[in-house]
Amino acid sequence: MSLKDASPYPFGAALSISKMKNTEIYNQVVKAELNSITAENAMKMSNLAPSAINKYSWTDADFFVDYAEANHMRVHGHCLVWHNSLPSWVNSYNGTKAEWIELLRNYITTVVTRYKGRIASWDVVNEALIDNGTPRQTIWLTKIGWEYVELAFRFAHEADPDAVLFYNDYGQEYSKVKLAAINDTVKNLVKRGVPIHGIGLQMLTNINQSAQNMVDAITQTAETGLVVHVSELDVALNRDKKPEYVINPTDVATQKSRYRSIAAAMCQLPESQSWGITTWGVGDPDSWLKGSPDFPLLFDMNYKPKSCYQGVHEAFAALK
Ligand code: 9MR
């Protein structure tokens, strides 16, 4: 059975436009296994508005949304506001606070409106906190102040009132401080009426991380009452970055067990709170981790299912 058929929640991956266009085996796996997709890069600001203010480049994002619709998949939009992957015209933009707010409003409104009704959910703000739980020093914080977070959600909600809006971040599984800070920050914003509906846990993790910490991250995030998305999952084998690393049965078994724990923890959430799991890439050739052999994904270098793929299936089978 495929992941999407066995899973009680949507199961997806981040996809690359060039592989969607050029790699047949990749497309076969995506279409057979997944029912939710996130653009790994195609919907970032540097891709949508690469060269100048109010000059958009929609080709890749349009292709992505068309592909999802043709294959009956959900699209999760990633990401409207981030400090990374900004076009250079933003980094050098010289404006007053009011002009920066207008830039943010105009960008979010334009992008969300274009795909209104076609993109189910958005990572509206990505990585706004650092590991000690305080605001990250970003251009948005410097130019607008912390209210940029709240404004971003309000602009997105105005543009598409039906879209499910996420605050997305990493580190919930390795830092209890950050986990609590993210959840408290989002809860306080929600209490003040800011339209945030969910929290994304990137969960770019590795086998040295304990299963308990991964499960706690999911469970405690769900205690906010908001929707939970494991949004960028991978479980790397070689985070000590040993160049001589050789894949071995012990590590493969740990990886399988970590994937199983994460999939199982998501199964414990009420359906209304589970936005599902998205892995950050489909197979090991797609991983963002470069420079050491990490083999972090569910399919191998030839896009064949790995043990960790079976681990996810075991979590689903245990529900029966
Ligand atoms: O995997 C993405 C890589 O191809 C890009 O070069 C990079 C910068 O845009 O972003 C990577 O994806 C990141 C994601 O957008 C946000 N969370 C961390 C991911 C891995 O760096």
Image (spheres, rainbow, N blue to C red):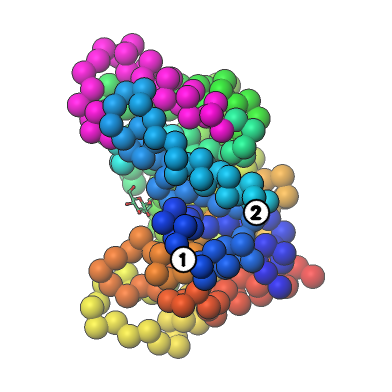
Q: Residue furthest bottom?
A: 249
Please state the extent of the stretch shown in magenta in the rendering: 87-115
Q: Does the segment drawn in magenta span residue 105?
A: yes
Residue at 31% from the left image edge and 35% from the top image edge = 50
- Number of marks drawn: 2
Residue 187 or residue 49, whichever sits in front: 49
Give x and y (percent) for residue 112: 52, 29
Q: Looking at the image, is 56 positioned above or below residue 212?
A: above
At mark 1, the secondary structure is: loop
Q: Main secondary structure of the magenta part?
A: helix
Q: Which residue is mark 2?
A: 71
Q: Spatial distance from mark 2 to mark 1, Cα to Cα?
A: 16 Å
Q: Secondary structure at mark 2?
A: loop
Q: x, y (%) of residue 116?
A: 60, 30
Q: Could you say which quadrant of the image residue 311 lies in?
A: bottom right
Where does label 1 land, which residue? 23
